[in-house]
Amino acid sequence: MTEAPPPRHKRSGLFAPIGLFIIVLIGWSIWWFVLAGQVRAQLDQRVEAMRVGGWDVAYSGMSTSGWPFRVRLGAEHVSITAPSGLAVAAPELAAEANAWNPDKWVLIVGDGLVVTRPGKGKVAVRGRFIRASVHGLTQRWPNVAVEMADPEFTSHVGAEVFPISRADKIEFYLRPHLAPAGSPGVETSVDVLFRLIDAEGRPGGPVEGMARNGKLTAQIEAVIEDADRLQGADAAGVFAAWTRAGGRFSALRGELSAGDSRATLSSDVLSASADGRLQGTISLQAVKPMAAIAGLAQSGSGAVNRVGAAGAAAATAVRGDDDMTLELTFRDGRTFLGPFAIVPAPKLF
């Protein structure tokens, strides 16, 4: 008796998942190209708006890549100059985001950058990596993070020497101000945090003097009130309009260490004068401050008032070198430790 042949399985069932995959792939590809086109168009609009506002923006070799899971914009010979004269230039710059979450972007500097400081010249910055991230673009203020690992700073010929030569890490963070709902000014304020880890000063400079050939570490956080006034920029810089409108820093807190010296600092309010110099008072709870002050007095920096720094060191020595409370006062464009003017007040613009 002849056996019946085994039943043949229909192959049509195999094509269903393949067809579904192809449909999803086509749909996703269409979404990716639409998204990439929108991102490129928005970037072009933003650049044009900056140029109308007085910024100089130049780049070459703009490209779009990253399919299927990322959107990546890359450009070469990027140069951005603000109306104030502050400028940043990079041979390579790239920004990328996940295609399924285009609200978060990471900016990567490929081969270092050059910062032009108005009136001070150019300084080259190189490191293991230099990157920034931005997310929450639909918020009034997005979350911003800037990170540099092992940065090195080299001033160009003829430029004013940069205060530090290198550091292990530099970080800056900005976010919408965290405060109970309904608190006054919460909607127009932002929190900022700056970290400088194990920085080394240039030879003969004030940082090297303060640290006594050791390293400087600083962590400072504050609230920037009326941050909406920071938008835009004129020839004086982004802080100028903010200052004229009464902008100020509040709830400033921080920690400093320079060699063997340590200090915690706090200030309820700091503002800026019409010429951009900080004004206000910072309280310091210091441990072994005399070494840092004496080193500052002996540094070769022309910005340091050696007589004032030496007087401050002598007064500190009289009080001993244990824990003590000190006050730094910014007024008349200078930084005072007690009655002694030691260095110019920090300048915002």
Image: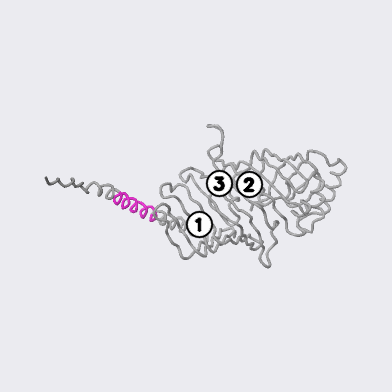
Q: Earlier in the sequence, mark 3 or mark 2?
A: 2
Is residue 31 in the magenta section?
yes
Instruction: Give the vertical position of 175 relative to 203 (above or below).
Output: above
Residue span colored magenta: 21-37
Q: Which residue bears the numbered disc 2?
A: 194
Viewer-proximal residue, 276 or 301? 301
Which element carries disc 3, helix, strand or loop?
Answer: helix
234 sits left or right of 276 in the view: left
Q: Earlier in the sequence, mark 1 or mark 3?
A: 1
Q: Classify 10 Å Cα crowding around label 1: few (below 14), some (14-19), many (20 and above).
A: some
2 sits left or right of 148 in the view: left
Q: Classify 10 Å Cα crowding around label 3: few (below 14), some (14-19), many (20 and above).
A: some
What's the distance in space between the residues labelled 3 and 2, CA to CA? 21 Å
Residue 272: % across, % down: 66, 47
Which element carries disc 2, helix, strand or loop?
Answer: strand
Q: Which residue bears the numbered disc 1?
A: 53
173 sits left or right of 163 in the view: left
Majority secondary structure of the magenta segment?
Answer: helix
Amino acid type indicated by mark 3: Arg
Q: Which residue bears the numbered disc 3?
A: 229
Residue 52: % across, % down: 48, 58
What's the distance in space between the residues labelled 1 and 2, CA to CA? 28 Å
Amino acid type indicated by mark 2: Phe
